[in-house]
């Protein structure tokens, strides 16, 4: 239900204000990158006219996994177990395919304990906007390295990481994920477009957002500090987004920008800042990303996009209606069916 | 003619009519399963109550396997330890197979094995299987498979089986594969014809037509569970293959293809997903149950071990879900293809912290059907994981039973608020016990109106679902969960009690039931001991259980595990009655026979004197 607003607060197509998409007050450390992501999720949900009651917010365990409490108060939240929100989300998507799933995870949650489920969720192409709030450390347990920590990165008290990191984006591309993006919590403009495009996508949309931990991984020798991310970030594109409802109002000026039509009718415009990077060419993009990682560059933007992918619902040949609310007549066969089964066994 | 319970001593010159056991020793992967099922089905078609137990290895091909068929005109269904008719087809085990049987046993064996020199108290019948199979099956590749059908023919002739019924059973077993049907029918005939002229005459074991299986079906417990789930309107199934539960989901897949497709679009109205592991399977069940689906998984002990964390979340966050545990022998990998009741405590208290779960213990295949059906109602009514605790013996073996009755009535979807009610509710809280029964009202994601959303968490929470570290909130929550669990006693299947009302009681559950039924007859007929019997069918225990414990001086608790796990649960709930419990245990990985019950009860009572 829309809240009372002043005349000046803009409303979206549902008549809701941005305030209708906020959540509880964050209890994360002041300055945490995650809060900046939360803010962009709120903005994207508002702009994309999400019906709050049609949204499921899922998470595992960790600082990132607390964030679903901080956005979309009127959506259903499920803060589950460490690393395994992917499976819960798979269950939700099976039960009710009309829901929009937003999953907030972290590098600890997704790239270590939850790696198996992360991989198989992508394999099944479960419809979800899967956000990894990636800070390279375990914050909630006070600052141990995570599996995305760069070689040479140090902990606050001086320990140096020598084990090579995992990259959720190259991994997702290898797995055939049709929407892979990386952003930086300090680049809200880019993140906003990526989030909207992810919401317009159908299937697993993975967004790895570098999100510095101000308490445990923001020091001088960290490779995941605000400063390090700003110094090394190389946006691949200027991104623009034309929402499905704006199609008639906005014309994209002709030029070098390429357009990607998204399943809900929205359009993503991509103006390449690096000529050699083509996000629609999975293997070339993957190679470029590996090379950039090797050079210590933080490539951000749309890393790979391929909108024609079958989803889990297609693989399972499911009915269009949500399974959860099918009437009894549809799901409980009648006595004649049991009789037929019994006759078969006589 | 003597008949009856398994421990009855038999004499050489008696004729056992419709009351004997057959053991077939073969190599797995040799097609013997089809032959054995034909033998079993023929007895069934001739009206003789019969059970079949496949003792198979955890292996695909080449290891020893035994199939035991028990014909019992009185309908005893427990495993019979003594063997009356032995078929030796496996050279590797033949000597041991012959050594273990009692005197007078008929032994049919593959001629080159030369077993007749091993003992002089058995009746041997060497059969030239290779010669016979070559006569009816020119294709060398198929001979290995068809060879087993030849012993069916030999046995049919020696025992007096009706060949028309044998051939009908083959047609049923190999439905639709006309070439295979013809080949196998020919092989059976070859064996039969050979036995008519060459096999020694015997009158000890006879099959006569009866009417006791009229109108009955043959089914395994896993298929029965699958049917229960299908008729309960299951909509999401997440699973990971594990013996001995896989066939439950595989059976459901087959049934669903036929009966759970949308008639217009041909699309499925149930999602059956093979997950990457049991942990993910449990996660899907929780997510789907939370979002309003009727969700289940099927697994065995190792899977339940893996699922523990999610099960605790389901309990604490109050998500419905059905967990079928087809128990196998643990601990660890244990014996994957052997039966056990070793997961009773695991299921009852799965996950860390204080947990208690509703568990249903089917004692026969009919209850596998009924209880799986009911588990969905219970899960949604009580918003919690519900366990159906079956086992390999029930789940994978074939049983004769009357056809299942259709579960009429509406599915109980539990306390779910619709948008209209929500609109008028003052101060709704997801975890608020507004009815005083411990069960709060829930909402489903997607419910419009703007008032039903809540936050689900595995962390401590107050009645509104908000995170809370207040001691009083936590204490209230876990106390309410226990109240809710105990209240489920109103809806779970009640125990079955029988007996004349004597001081000696037997308490059992699950697949121990056939052994107890037979043991009670033996105790009465051969030892003059009367018994009362209570079969537990669910946790939480209901009033009948404590009454039974109170009114019996000694209660023998029969279980197929080492530690007397059900007895432990009984002691937990009724510590004051613990002294009268005596455990009767069988845990060598075979299905419990009646003798195990009789002998242990007699041993207790003779040592007490």
Image (cartoon, helix red, strand yellow):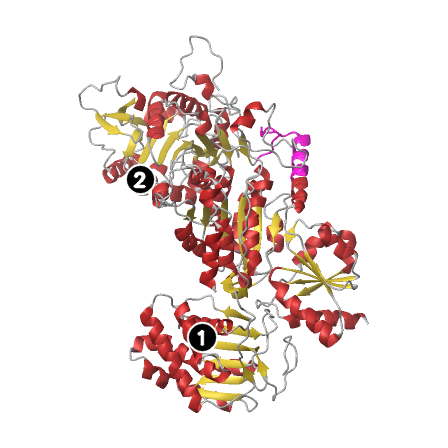
Q: Is residue B344 above or below residue B51?
A: above
Q: CA distance from mark 2 to mark 1?
A: 60 Å
* Residue appearing at x 37%, y 20% in the figure: A47
Local packing at callout 2 (Cα closer than 10 Å; few below 14, some 14-19, many 20+) is many
Dot 2: element: helix
Q: Quadrant of the N terminus of chain B?
A: bottom right
Chain bearing tag 2 is: A
Q: Is residue B476 magenta?
A: yes
* Residue appearing at x 51%, y 81% in the figure: B86
In the image, A141 versus B120, the foreground residue is B120
Q: Position of residue B134 (x, y in %)?
A: 32, 83
The residue where tag 2 is placed is: A173
Name the mark on residue B271: none
Q: Which residues are magenta?
A: B459-481
B236 sits left or right of B565 in the view? left
The residue where tag 1 is placed is: B165
Single out the residue that lies furthest toward the right: B609
- Can see residue B235? no
């Amino acid at each position: 239900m829309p809240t009372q607003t002043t005349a000046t607060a803009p409303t979206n197509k549902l008549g809701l204000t941005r305030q209708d998409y906020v959540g509880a007050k964050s209890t994360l450390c002041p300055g945490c990158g995650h809060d900046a992501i939360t803010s962009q999720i709120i903005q994207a949900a508002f702009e994309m006219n999400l019906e709050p009651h049609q949204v499921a917010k899922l998470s595992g365990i960790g600082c990132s996994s607390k964030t679903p409490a901080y956005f979309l108060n009127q959506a259903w939240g499920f803060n589950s177990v460490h690393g395994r929100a992917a499976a819960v989300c798979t269950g939700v998507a099976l039960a009710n395919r009309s829901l929009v799933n937003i999953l907030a995870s972290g590098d600890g949650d997704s790239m270590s304990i939850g790696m198996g489920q992360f991989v198989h969720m992508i394999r099944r192409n479960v419809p979800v906007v899967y956000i990894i709030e990636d800070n390279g450390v375990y914050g909630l347990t006070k600052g141990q390295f995570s599996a995305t920590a760069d070689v040479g990165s140090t902990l606050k008290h001086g320990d140096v990481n020598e084990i090579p990191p995992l990259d959720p984006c190259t991994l997702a591309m290898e797995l055939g994920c049709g929407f892979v993006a990386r952003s930086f919590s300090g680049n809200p403009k880019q993140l906003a477009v990526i989030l909207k495009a992810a919401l317009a996508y159908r299937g697993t949309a993975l967004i790895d957002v570098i999100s510095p931990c101000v308490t445990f991984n923001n020091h001088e020798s960290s490779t995941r500090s605000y400063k390090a991310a700003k110094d090394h970030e190389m946006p691949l594109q200027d991104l623009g987004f034309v929402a499905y409802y704006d199609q008639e109002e906005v014309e994209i000026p002709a030029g070098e920008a390429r357009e990607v039509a998204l399943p809900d009718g929205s359009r993503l415009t991509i103006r390449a800042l690096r000529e050699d990077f083509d996000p629609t060419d999975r293997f070339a993009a993957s190679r470029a990303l590996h090379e950039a990682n090797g050079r210590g560059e933080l490539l951000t933007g749309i890393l790979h996009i391929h909108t024609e992918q079958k989803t889990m619902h297609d693989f399972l040949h499911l009915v269009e209606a949500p399974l959860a609310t099918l009437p009894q007549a549809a799901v409980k066969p009648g006595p004649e069916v049991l009789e037929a089964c019994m006759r078969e066994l006589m | 003619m003597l008949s009856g319970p398994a421990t009855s001593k038999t004499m050489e010159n008696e004729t056992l009519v419709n009351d004997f056991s057959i053991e077939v020793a073969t190599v797995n992967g040799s097609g013997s399963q089809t032959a054995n099922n034909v033998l079993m089905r023929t007895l069934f078609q001739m009206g003789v109550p019969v059970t079949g137990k496949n003792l198979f290895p955890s292996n695909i091909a080449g290891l020893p396997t035994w199939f035991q068929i028990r014909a019992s005109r009185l309908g005893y269904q427990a495993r019979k330890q003594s063997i009356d008719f032995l078929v030796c087809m496996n050279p590797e085990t033949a000597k041991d197979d012959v050594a273990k049987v009692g005197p007078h046993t008929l032994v049919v064996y593959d001629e080159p094995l030369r077993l007749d020199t091993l003992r002089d108290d058995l009746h041997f019948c060497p059969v030239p299987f290779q010669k016979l199979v070559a006569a009816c099956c020119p294709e060398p590749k198929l001979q290995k498979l068809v060879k087993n059908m030849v012993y069916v023919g030999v046995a049919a002739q020696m025992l007096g089986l009706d060949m028309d019924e044998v051939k009908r059973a083959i047609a049923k077993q190999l439905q639709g594969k006309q070439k295979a049907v013809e080949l196998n029918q020919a092989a059976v005939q070859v064996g039969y014809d050979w036995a008519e002229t060459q096999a020694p005459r015997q009158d000890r074991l006879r099959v006569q037509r009866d009417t006791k299986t009229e109108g009955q079906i043959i089914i395994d417990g896993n298929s029965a569970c699958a049917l229960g789930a299908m008729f309960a309107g299951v909509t999401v199934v997440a699973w990971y293959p594990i013996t001995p539960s896989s066939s439950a989901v595989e059976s459901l897949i087959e049934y669903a293809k036929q009966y759970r497709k949308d008639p217009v679009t041909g699309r499925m109205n149930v999602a059956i997903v093979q997950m990457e592991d049991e942990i993910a399977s449990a996660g899907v069940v929780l997510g789907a149950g939370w979002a309003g689906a009727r969700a289940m998984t099927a697994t065995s002990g190792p899977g339940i071990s893996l699922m523990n964390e999610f099960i605790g979340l389901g309990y604490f966050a109050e998500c419905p879900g059905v967990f079928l545990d087809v128990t196998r022998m643990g601990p660890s990998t244990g014996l994957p293809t052997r039966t056990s009741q070793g997961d009773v405590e695991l299921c009852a208290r799965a996950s860390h912290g204080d947990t208690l779960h509703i568990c249903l213990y089917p004692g026969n295949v009919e209850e596998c059907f009924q209880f799986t059906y009911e588990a969905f109602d219970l899960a949604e009514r009580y918003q919690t994981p519900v366990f159906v605790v079956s086992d390999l013996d029930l789940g994978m073996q074939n049983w004769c039973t009357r056809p299942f009755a259709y579960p009429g009535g509406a599915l109980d979807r539990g306390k779910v608020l619709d948008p209209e009610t929500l609109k008028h509710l003052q101060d709704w809280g997801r975890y608020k016990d507004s009815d005083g029964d411990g069960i709060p009202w829930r909402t489903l994601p997607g419910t419009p109106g703007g008032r039903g959303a809540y936050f689900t968490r595995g962390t401590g929470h107050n009645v509104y679902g908000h995170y809370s570290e207040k001691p009083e909130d936590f204490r209230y929550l876990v106390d309410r969960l226990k109240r809710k669990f105990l209240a489920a006693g109103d809806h779970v299947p009640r125990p079955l009690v029988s007996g004349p009302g004597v001081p000696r009681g037997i308490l059992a559950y699950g697949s121990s039931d056939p052994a107890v039924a037979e043991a009670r007859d033996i105790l009465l007929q051969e030892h003059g001991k009367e018994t009362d019997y209570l079969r537990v069918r669910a946790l939480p225990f209901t009033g009948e259980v404590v009454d039974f414990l109170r009114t019996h001086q000694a209660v023998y608790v029969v279980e197929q595990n080492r530690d007397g796990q059900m007895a432990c649960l009984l002691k937990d709930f009724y510590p004051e009655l613990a002294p009268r419990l005596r455990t009767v245990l069988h845990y060598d990985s075979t299905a419990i026979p009646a003798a195990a019950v009789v002998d242990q009860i007699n041993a207790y009572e003779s040592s007490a004197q």
